[in-house]
Image (cartoon, helix red, strand yellow):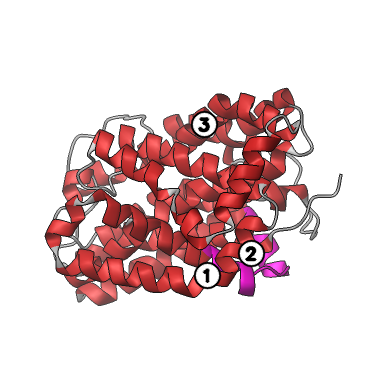
Amino acid sequence: MKTERRHDIDWLRVIAIALLLIYHIAIIFQPWAMFIAFIRSDELLTALWQPMTMLNVWRIPILFYVSGMGVYFAMRKRTSLALLKERARRILVPFLFGFVAITPLHMFVFQDYYNIGLSYYPHMGHLWFLGNIFVYVLICLPVFYVVKNNKVSRFAAVFNKLIKNPFGLLSVNLLFVAEALWLQPNPFSMYAETLHGFVLGFIAFLLGFLFMNSGNVFWKTIAQWKWAYLVLAVILYTIRSQMPAAEGLPYITVIEMNSWIFSIFGFCHQYLNKPSKLLSYLSTAAYPVYIIHMIVMYLAAKFILPFHFPAILSFVLITVVTFAGCYLIYEFIIRRVFWLRPLFGLKLKPAKLERNSEEHIVVHAD
């Protein structure tokens, strides 16, 4: 069965992972960094947080959407059991390995930097996202089955009719508003290891799957209305940034979140849905880089911050070293050592960078 290539979704995942790295580096230069076990710079760069607050409301939810879309592709050629085995190999194995062997490493660096006694501390850390995704797959297996076998055609017809309309598409915000009113997250962007992050992620994951199942209906709507969604997102972000009280109004934050996401989907669909060798490489590298980036970033901060450079220079240096270090570790170790590959979600045998590679299609959504 031939799977339609969606290069724009691949690019979305690559871009989202890159922004995640930059976001985490920005935390180093905030006064509260140590409260969440980040190394903190003595030279702060608080102005950097203003654009980060814009990213904060959509950077994680868009990955949940993309993950649901990726599962749609994965299940088209698999039975439910085969899908579960494939997701366990791609998600659960790296999650468990990272829990015991990756996340403790950056905690060692943190402890050493602050002269805290070294102790082994296995934890989810930034890999909480993978744990959530695997649980979503388990929960949604019955949904995947009935959708794949066209047993909910009436629901699909109603859903497709709803999202044909730009305002109908925005009606999905009601699900997220209900979640926020129920759990009352404070702040809204506290996704990691929280019930709020789990429920919000589940909604976005399932919607991503349903959007892909709609065929071209979703993509036509966002392509046509991408500028309107972008303007709405900018307006709501401006309100939220200028009126602190607006942060506590879930409908403002939720509509802003999805307006950013729908506009980004629309622009990527129009301009980035094309193949390239660079994309083939990056879409495969993004997952291992996501797994290792924290240890590389902590090491970069450990060696650069003691020089007390101006904050902006330190930020640039840590960013360059983190991206370069992640590339070198991926390219010369993870990618080439065959027994390491499965631990980072890659196939045991190195995949050729072919345009029709299944790894290129599926891994992007993990």
What kind of element bears circle 1? helix
Mark nearer the viewer, 1 or 3: 1
Residue at the disc numbered 1 = 225
Horizontally, is 160 left or right of 246 in the view? right
Q: Residue at x 26, y 49 (%)?
A: 250
Which portion, as a residue range, is magenta?
Answer: 265-284
* C-alpha separation, residue under disc 2 versus residue under disc 1: 9 Å
What kind of element bears circle 3? helix
Crowd band around label 2 with a 10 angstrom C-alpha radius: few (<14), some (14–19), many (20+): some
Task: Name the kind of residue labelled 3 in the image.
Answer: Tyr
| Mark closer to the chain start, 1 or 3 | 3
**Does residue 366 show up?**
no
What kind of element bears circle 2? helix
Q: Residue at x 65, y 31 (%)?
A: 144
Mark nearer the viewer, 2 or 3: 2
- The numbered dot on residue 338 is none
Instruction: Report the quarter where the C terminus lies.
Output: top right
Task: Name the kind of residue labelled 1 in the image.
Answer: Trp
Horizontally, is 86 left or right of 208 in the view? right
Secondary structure mostly taken by the magenta-highlighted segment of the chain: helix
Residue at the disc numbered 2 = 220
List x then y, in percent, for residue 100. Answer: 43, 29
Is 270 a magenta residue? yes
* Whether residue 215 is situated above or below residue 348 in the rendered picture: below
Task: Name the kind of residue labelled 2 in the image.
Answer: Lys
Crowd band around label 1 with a 10 angstrom C-alpha radius: few (<14), some (14–19), many (20+): some
Crowd band around label 3 with a 10 angstrom C-alpha radius: few (<14), some (14–19), many (20+): many
* C-alpha separation, residue under disc 2 versus residue under disc 3: 27 Å
List x then y, in percent, for residue 101. Answer: 45, 34
